Amino acid sequence: MNRIFFILILAGVPLSVAAALLHWPAVASFIIYCVTIIALASYMGRATESLAIVVGPRIGGLLNATFGNAVELIISIFALKAGLISVVLASLTGSVLGNLLLVGGLSFFIGGLKFKRQRFNVHDAQHNAGLMIFAIVVAFVFPEVFSMTLNDQESFTLSIWVSAIMIILYLAALYFKLVTHRGVYAYDEEKGENEEQETAEWTKSKSILVLGLATLAVAYISENLVHTFEEVGETLGWSEIFIGIIIVAIVGNAAEHASAVMMAYKNKVGVTVEIAVGSTLQIAMFVAPVLVLASVFFEKQMSLVFSMPELVSMVLAVFLTISITNDGDTNWFEGLTLLAAYMIMGVGFYLL
Amino acid sequence: MNRIFFILILAGVPLSVAAALLHWPAVASFIIYCVTIIALASYMGRATESLAIVVGPRIGGLLNATFGNAVELIISIFALKAGLISVVLASLTGSVLGNLLLVGGLSFFIGGLKFKRQRFNVHDAQHNAGLMIFAIVVAFVFPEVFSMTLNDQESFTLSIWVSAIMIILYLAALYFKLVTHRGVYAYDEEKGENEEQETAEWTKSKSILVLGLATLAVAYISENLVHTFEEVGETLGWSEIFIGIIIVAIVGNAAEHASAVMMAYKNKVGVTVEIAVGSTLQIAMFVAPVLVLASVFFEKQMSLVFSMPELVSMVLAVFLTISITNDGDTNWFEGLTLLAAYMIMGVGFYLL
Amino acid sequence: MNRIFFILILAGVPLSVAAALLHWPAVASFIIYCVTIIALASYMGRATESLAIVVGPRIGGLLNATFGNAVELIISIFALKAGLISVVLASLTGSVLGNLLLVGGLSFFIGGLKFKRQRFNVHDAQHNAGLMIFAIVVAFVFPEVFSMTLNDQESFTLSIWVSAIMIILYLAALYFKLVTHRGVYAYDEEKGENEEQETAEWTKSKSILVLGLATLAVAYISENLVHTFEEVGETLGWSEIFIGIIIVAIVGNAAEHASAVMMAYKNKVGVTVEIAVGSTLQIAMFVAPVLVLASVFFEKQMSLVFSMPELVSMVLAVFLTISITNDGDTNWFEGLTLLAAYMIMGVGFYLL
């Protein structure tokens, strides 16, 4: 698998440069960019993991928590710069739906075909449920409802406040998890294990080098990718919303998705939930607010105001996920339920 | 009780025919039809149960799952044929509210007056909670929100997709419950019991005969019943919505309701929950989508788009039921809470 | 602390009378009134508690349940009399948000700084969760949704019904808790303890005297307080909604808030939850419906129809609180999450 990604990068980066400079047709460029970004993202993921092991669990946890959705963040920054506010909001929505329903669903389903029941730590599930309710149900719904009464400037002010509070709470959540309550809620049998076993794939300097180069390449390609959206949409008859929700979200998270499903197949469904829900929280509590704050420096400012279908989809996905994971037990049917919800939403956004 | 139903059928069927042919006044006909259908429904229920025991648990489970709400389905089909879309949606709503709030509430209340605490399997409650969130909160809310942006044709396309996905998931749920995970989540003390003890009331051929004849009679009477709604509404000052939500829902489910309350009184509250929630899921995941798909063949097509009060009532009923049943423990006060919610909604729909 | 309140009353009552008679500037009067009411409220609280101990647990429980939010009720009655419907609804909202998010959050946060994990009875939490869903999610949301279709008179009729049903259910909840299921759901280790130890601070007659005098004083000052809102709002640039939601709610509940935080600091987080959630339920199921019914006798009638931001805030606060308390375990981070939600809502209502 790593070998394939290596080849894809070797071929994809030059092709991407060529596509950008020679103005190749939008759809072809779009595909080249997407594939290359997926391959680069897998290298960024490996570099981040190696680095996290080298620097120890605390700073490592922080690294994972900030670089885990770096690709998504980079693409979104360029989309923001290009003024494609609705694409950015759609891709945030798509990441949340993709992580909870598609990744969660696929993992539980495939894991469940092999194992009758898969269990994970209920305490983590409940902790995460509280955060998802806070981030998506409270912090996303609230500006929406108020924006109906507020004018645009007030709405943006509220978004800034909400974003600042979310980032602070996200940092506090890391501090809670990595420092004050490290291991407090772990299963007894898990305690102390799992931690020493990991060895870094790459050295510290190699990790930093790979991370730096891959990030640069992703940034370059993302800037070009963003400008193909309009034409691709017209050619294929997709709305920009659909591209944001389905395509960008899948490209930005492909590597992560694969490893989540892998873990469920190995009966480590706790890690799957950690990835799917953890990534959702990172998108909602870190990437989204950072984008709002970043938009201060761009021409068009982005309020944290999703469209009604986007908001409702995310809220429903959260409630469904919580009701399915709060017993700390999954099976193939629960996976199928999540996938069915994803499919319903996919059809809805396609028709929109 | 069975004797009474037998007499009611003997008298009711000829009276219904007379009422239909001689065009008796609407309110009188309406009452005759309703009473006769309730009596016939009890025979259909007994026939289905006998048949289910004879053919074994798997096919029996499937039988119960498809014929359990046959009366409701038949009445709705004729209402659909008569173009009374809003009555159909109202009666679906009424069935959901009736099963969760009225039947659940009455059972818990009456059972709780006799027993201080009544317990049931938490795993089933959580499994059902996930399905209710999927069916009612996701699959019903979603088309509603999207229909605000979509045109009628797109809205109906979305409804078709949602309906197809729901039926597939409903069949998967049966497969999960009856085949792959049969007994996996049962209480230890329950395992293996309860299954052999039941003996069929009627033979296979008698069951099929009764089921066939009763279904035909229900169909005939339903067709006539549906055409009385308008005049009954005008005479009594009830809206068609109110007739659908309160009357049709109660007529369609009366036999089931009685046995659910009976079971709670015998301290078998697990069976009560199974009936109330199971019937709700059947309505939402099977009857409703079948009606949407069936409407393709009728003049007026039915999108899965409820009115706002209907949708909100169902969602609130689901959340209330889940928050009350998820501890696997009921008492009279929890029953009263559900009844209070039913009463509030009844007043609301009456005023509408 | 009691000493300070005594001095505040000695100084505050004459000052309040002076401010009212001599028409002092609004902001100064407003501050004097607020401080005096807070001090008087602490005396009312102590008198109610003494009385509750003297008369025994059953009538005592009833006393606490009716006088616990007496100050809030009195201020609201005078606001209602002055026709300030929107201030009344705002202060009900503010009490719910304040109890759940501010008091709950502050208590869990401060308690959590001292103790790593604080636990309380899960059964109580689940019982309360059901009631909060009933009271705030069902009984508050329902009239709102229906009021969109109903005219004002029908809307008020529905509010009357909802209010009557809520009060009956509230009384039933007391009967359940104090009579039929007293101690049924208690922790084993708690059973029988805690009850005999308490001794009344004051005698029965002194309690009644203090309660009577303090209530009179609060009533007198409240009437004047209510009339400063408009001018204070204009002077400080606050909307009446903001005054209702933040100020009136805090003034009305200050004494209770302090003791809830105190209890968490003493690791009695179960009492904290009892105060915060119990007070919320009292506001929603007793104070709010009593105000609706009382408004029949005033010039302007009050329907139970909150503004959309108010309603959504309360519903979100309930979902967040339930998802955080349903594991019977709190820590500083969960407290911080509640506080973050309170802050977001505070900013939103300030901008409104």
Image: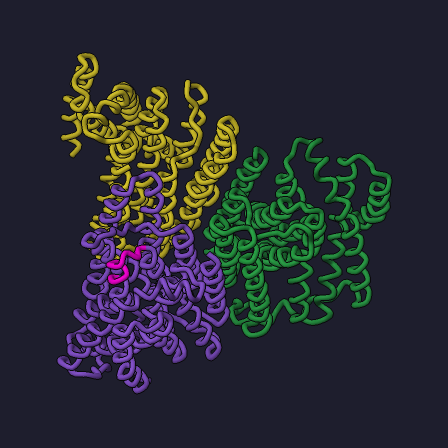
Chain colours: A purple, B green, C yellow
Q: Position of residue B122 (x, y in %)?
A: 49, 61
Q: Main secondary structure of the magenta part?
A: helix
* C206 lies above or below A192: above
Give the image location of residue A88, x and y in percent.
31, 59
Asked if the stretch drawn in magenta spans residue C58, the answer is no
Q: Residue at x 86, y 46 (%)?
A: B14
The relative height of residue C101 versus residue B49 in the rendered view (above or below) is above
Q: Quadrant of the C terminus of chain B?
A: top right
Q: Is residue C190 left or right of residue A213?
A: right
Which of the 4 image quarters holds residue A248? bottom left
Residue C112 in sight in this render: no
Figure check: B26 above or below A165: above
Q: Residue B191 location, x and y as percent?
A: 57, 70
Q: Nearer the viewer, residue C95 or A111?
A: A111
Q: Residue furthest bottom?
A: A3
The answer to whether one can see residue A35 in this image is yes
Report how many numbered discs are placed on residues in the image. Answer: 0
- Lateral position of residue B314 relative to residue B197, left or right: left
Instruction: Determine which quarter of the picture holds residue B16.
Output: top right
Give the residue furthest to the front: A22
Q: Position of residue C332 (x, y in %)?
A: 23, 54
Pick the front one: A254 or A284: A254
What residue appears at the point 52 percent right and 40 percent down from the top-left corner?
A: B340
Decide if residue C69 is on the left or right side of residue A60.
right
- The range drawn in magenta is A77-85
A221 vs B145, nearest the viewer: A221
Q: Quadrant of residue A70?
A: bottom left
